[in-house]
Amino acid sequence: MAEAEVEELPKAIVRRLVKEKLAQVAAGGAEVIVNKDAMSAFAESARIFIHYLSATANDMCKESKRQTINADDVLKALDEMEFPEFVEPLNTSLQEFRNKNAARRSETTQKKAEKRRKIDKESLPQEQNDAADHGKTDED
């Protein structure tokens, strides 16, 4: 039987996240150098955390007799895992994400409505021309 393949997080993303966070907390804005082993440790720690969080959120979902994990399950899982300090920042990010998506959907809906109005306007003279071709006028 083949051994299960371990999924890794993209190294470039892990590196970028680690460097951004270290730049935020570094004294005087000094660049912190992270060696290859440390970067691997960050990546593996993040992978394990994601697996643990996923399993715990899945348990929260099953307790609610559902099959689809939602954001509330993840938030409850963070509390269950004793990471309550993550809940508020995650709620803030989640709300920003929802607001951006709502604005994007609204913008898309407006563009579609404008496009329909434009098409309707362009087709109106054609319909009047077709009526005139058949001996009908607006005066009839």
Image: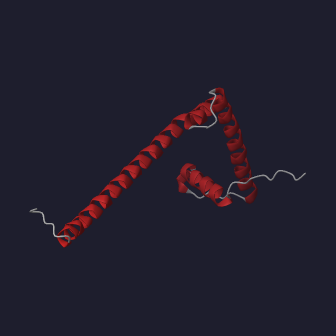
Q: Is residue 17 above or below residue 124?
A: above
Q: Position of residue 77 (x, y in %)?
A: 63, 32
* Location of residue 8 in the rendering, given as x and y in whole percent from the top left corner: 73, 54
Q: With 8 as the anchor, is 133 left or right in this view? A: left
Image height check: is 124 above or below 53? below
Left or right of 115, for residue 21: right
- Which quadrant is the C terminus positioned in? bottom left
Q: Single out the residue that lies furthest toward the bottom.
A: 133
Q: Is residue 76 above or below residue 97?
A: above
Q: Position of residue 24 (x, y in %)?
A: 54, 51
* Colour pattern of the rendering: secondary structure
Image location of residue 86, percent across then percent down: 57, 37
Identified at 68% across, 43% down, the residue is 50
Q: Determine if residue 82 is in view.
A: no
Q: Looking at the picture, does residue 45 appear above or below residue 91?
A: below
Image quarter for residue 79? top right
Left or right relative to 95: residue 69: right
Number of numbered discs on residues:
0
The residue shown at (60%, 52%) is 22
* Residue extending furthest toward the left: 139
Residue 127 appears in view: yes
Q: Viewer-proximal residue, 120 or 88? A: 120
In the image as oriented, which residue stretches furthest toward the right?
Answer: 1
Q: Nearer the viewer, residue 122 or 79?
A: 122
Q: Residue at x 88, y 53 (%)?
A: 2
The quarter of the displayed image where residue 129 is located: bottom left
Instruction: Please tell me which residue is depicted at 57% across the width and 57% down the height of the picture.
Output: 30
Q: Nearer the viewer, residue 136 or 125?
A: 136
